[in-house]
């Protein structure tokens, strides 16, 4: 098991674009707050998520506001609504699950409703604001 330690912005090397993400950071190294963490989270998400993943995430939020669906059902509706092929929608939903942005059933707990996590909802709000 890997041990995670806190590092300053200048030490981060997990993402190839970490310097780009942090070079525009308006937070000082001594100032750690929710706003600073949220800013870094949004910048990393924008940089590292594909356009398809962003589309799937935002469309999922819209669909799940009024419906209770499994991942499979959500992928089916997403493919119709976004014109993304079903298999691509399902694959991207699984990728979003691996990122901790979407929860739902898997081979061990089939039928569990899909939901967006609180960080995903923050990201969706941010992405929707950026479109305006």
Image: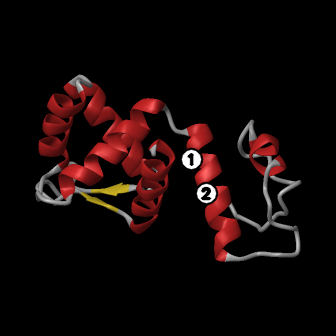
Helix, strand or loop at mark 2: helix
Q: Quadrant of the N terminus?
A: bottom right
Task: Using the rendered view, name the quadrant where residue 118 is placed.
Answer: bottom left
**Considering depth in this image, is 25 or 71 the residue closer to the camera?**
25
Looking at the picture, how far across and down is residue 101, in whole percent?
A: 41, 55
Residue at left 28%, top 44%?
59
Along the viewing direction, whichever of 15 and 29 lies nearer the viewer: 29
Q: In this rendering, is residue 83 above or below 7? A: above
Tell me whether circle 1 and circle 2 mark residues in contact (CB < 8 Å): yes
Check the image and name the residue furthest to the front: 132
| Number of numbered labels in the structure image | 2
Mark seen at residue 5: none
Residue depicted at x 39% and y 61%: 121
Q: Which of 120 and 126 is in front in this view?
A: 126
The Cα–Cα distance between marks 1 and 2, rounded to whole angstroms, is 6 Å
SS under mark 1: helix
Q: Would you call the spot at circle 1 few (<14 residues within 10 Å), some (14-19), or many (20 or more)?
A: some
Can you see residue 62?
Answer: yes
Q: Which residue is drawn at 14% across and 51% down?
A: 70
Residue 65 appears left or right of 37: left
What coloring was used for the rendering? secondary structure
Residue 6 in which image quadrant: bottom right
Q: Which residue lies under the disc numbered 1?
A: 45
Q: Which residue is drawn at 64% across and 75% down?
A: 34
Q: What x and y, as percent, mark residue 81?
A: 18, 33
Provide the residue designation for mark 2. 41
Within 10 Å of the Cα at label 2, are there few (<14), some (14-19), or many (20+) other Cα atoms? Answer: some
- Residue 108 in sight from this viewpoint: no
Question: In the image, residue 115 lies at what x, y percent?
Answer: 26, 60
Q: Where is residue 36 in the image (x, y as percent from the top left)?
A: 70, 67
Left or right of 88? Residue 113 is left
């Amino acid at each position: 098991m890997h041990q995670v330690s806190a590092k300053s912005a200048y030490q981060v090397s997990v993402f190839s674009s970490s310097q780009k993400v942090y070079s525009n950071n308006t937070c000082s190294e001594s100032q750690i707050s929710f706003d600073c963490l949220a800013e870094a989270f949004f910048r990393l998400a924008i940089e590292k998520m594909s356009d398809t993943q962003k589309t799937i995430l935002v469309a999922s939020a819209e669909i799940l506001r009024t419906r209770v669906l499994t991942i499979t059902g959500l992928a089916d509706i997403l493919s119709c609504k976004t014109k993304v092929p079903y298999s691509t929608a399902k694959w991207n939903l699984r990728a979003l699950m691996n990122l901790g942005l979407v929860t739902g059933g898997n081979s061990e707990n089939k039928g569990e409703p899909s939901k967006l996590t609180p960080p995903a909802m923050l990201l969706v709000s941010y992405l929707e604001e950026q479109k305006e």
